[in-house]
Amino acid sequence: MNYLAHAFLSKHNKDLLIGNFIADHIRGNDFKNYSPEIVKGIHLHRNIDAFTDGHEEFKKSKRVFYDGFEKYSGILVDIYFDYFLAKNFTLYSDKPLDVFSKDVYKIYEDHRHLLPYSSSRFLEYVIQNNIYKEYANLDGIKTVLYHLSHRIKHTVQLDDSLLLFKKNEAVLESNFTLFFKEAASVFLQ
């Protein structure tokens, strides 16, 4: 799952949100600069990633993108699963997506001094493009994938995966629904 799902599974807890947001920007287990509560968020992020990577519905979804995008299939499914979460956010949350996004961005901003440099730079991109809200539409997804293609500096245009996505959208959404129901039961208890 990508950033929106990680934020959602942080249960409105500011420390979990911060740790979950910075986890991809921290290598190893050198957590001396972070409170135990933020470290729990880092561990939560890693546990969510492990759960996701091992889940059968996620694995089935990755196979959809093996034709031309196999190396990036996990990243693509992470992002497309965030699309389904964002698109159907009211099924999972009492807060509308735009309110949830603004609340989470505020927490990130208020704690920017705790973020590693790379997380702080990424936060600028997230807020400037209102990424969590933009995940709810395919134009937003296309933009995210386009920018990601340039950040990873490979010749693959990840936004070209939209053709495969559209062709398999119903199956992928069904996979997501089953997957997220289990993820929520594990991480939102």
Image: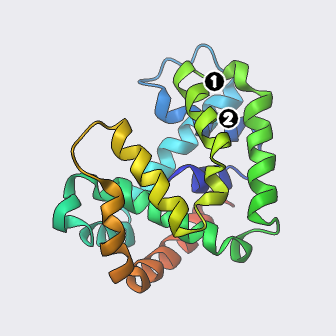
Q: Quadrant of residue 115?
A: top right
Judge left or right: residue 149 versus residue 6.
left
Q: Residue at x 44, y 58 (%)?
A: 78
For numbered disc 1, what is the local secondary structure? loop
- The reply to whether discs 1 and 2 touch (Cβ–Cβ < 8 Å) is yes
Q: Nearer the viewer, residue 109 or 54?
A: 109
C-alpha gap between disc 1 and disc 2 = 8 Å
Residue 165 drawn at (x, y percent): 36, 73
Q: Is residue 166 above or below residue 51?
A: below
- Residue 136 spot, x, y in % from top left: 61, 67
Image quarter hosting the C terminus: bottom right
Label 2: state its secondary structure.
helix
User: At x 67% / y 30%, what residue is drawn?
Assistant: 38
Would you place residue 125 above or below residue 177 in this image?
above
- The amino acid type found where label 1 is placed reads Leu
Q: Is residue 168 above or below residue 94?
A: below
The reply to whether residue 1 is visible in this rendering is: no
- Residue 27 appears left or right of 118: left
User: Looking at this rendering, what residue extends furthest in the top direction?
Assistant: 32
Q: Which amino acid type corresponds to the residue marked 2 in the rendered image?
A: Ile
Residue 69 on image: x %, y %: 23, 59
Q: Which mark is residue 18?
A: 2
Q: Residue furthest left?
A: 67
Query: Is residue 68 in sight in this rendering?
Result: yes
Q: Quadrant of residue 89?
A: bottom right
Local crowd size for mark 1, using a 10 Å CA cut-off: few (<14), some (14–19), many (≥20): many
Q: Residues within 10 Å of mark 2 (few under 14, many from 20)?
A: many
Q: Which residue is mark 1?
A: 115
The residue nearer to you, when weighing 91 against 96, is 96
Residue situated in front as seen by the camera: 148 or 21 = 148
The answer to whether residue 58 is left or right of residue 80 is left
